[in-house]
Structure formats: structure tokens, C-alpha cells
Image: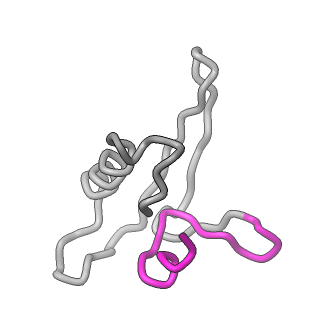
Amino acid sequence: FFISNWIYEGLVHYGHNGHIRAALATEWDISAKADGGEQYRFTLREGVKFHDGTPFNCAAVKMNFDHVLHPPLNHNWYHGW
């Protein structure tokens, strides 16, 4: 899991003493949902591009979350990341 931190940059990262710090997200807001869950809203860093020049944007973040949360990746027995 931690080797991916050497290759990929995330929305946030762990800083000193485990504090969550900004990375590709410049800020975020966490709000409670009526069903007891939480909603996270990230503000993305501007001007970031992938290695091939494609812009980093909301669609790219959504695609990655959709991939990770899609079966079978969303089961507690699967640790493919």
C-alpha cells in the first residue's frame, strides 16, 4: 500500500505525527449525511497535468474512485491496491 505513495500523488497525504496534509487537494470539507455517513468535498489543485499532458480534474478523480469502489475491489478481503 505505501509503495504507491512513492509512485502516485494522492488528494492528501500524511504529514508529521500523522496529520493529514494537502496534496492534489488544496482543501476539503467533511459533512454529515442524513443516513449517518459522511460526504467529503475536495477542492482540487489547479494546473496539474498527468505525465502525458492530460489535465488533472474532477473527472479523473471520479474515474479512480469508481474503479476502486467497483466489485471486487470494494470487498474487505481484496487488497489489490
Return the residue found at the far right: 17
45 up-or-down from 16: above or below: above
On whether residue 67 falls in the magenta region, the answer is no
17 is higher (above) or lower (below) than 34: below
How is the model colour-coded?
Answer: one colour
Please determine whether, in this image, residue 74 is positioned above or below residue 36: below
When asked about the image quadrant of residue 45, the answer is bottom left
Q: Is residue 33 above or below residue 67?
A: above
Residue in the foreground of this view, choosing between 76 and 64: 76
Query: Residue at horizontal 27%, vertical 51%?
Result: 63
Residue 72 in percent (x, y) is at 35, 43
- Quadrant of the image containing the N terminus: bottom right
| Residue drawn at point x = 39 percent, y = 43 percent | 69
Q: Position of residue 54 (x, y in %)?
A: 18, 72
The reply, left or right, for residue 1 in relation to residue 45 is: right
Q: Please name the residue shown 53% across and 43% down the image.
A: 76
User: Which region is colored magenta?
Assistant: 1-19
Q: Which of 38 and 58 is in front in this view?
A: 38
Q: Is residue 8 magenta?
A: yes
Q: x, y percentage for residue 58?
A: 31, 53
As drawn, the residue found furthest toward the top would be: 34
How far from the left and from the top, in percent, is residue 64? 32, 55
Q: How many marks?
A: 0
Q: In which quarter of the image is the C terminus?
A: bottom left
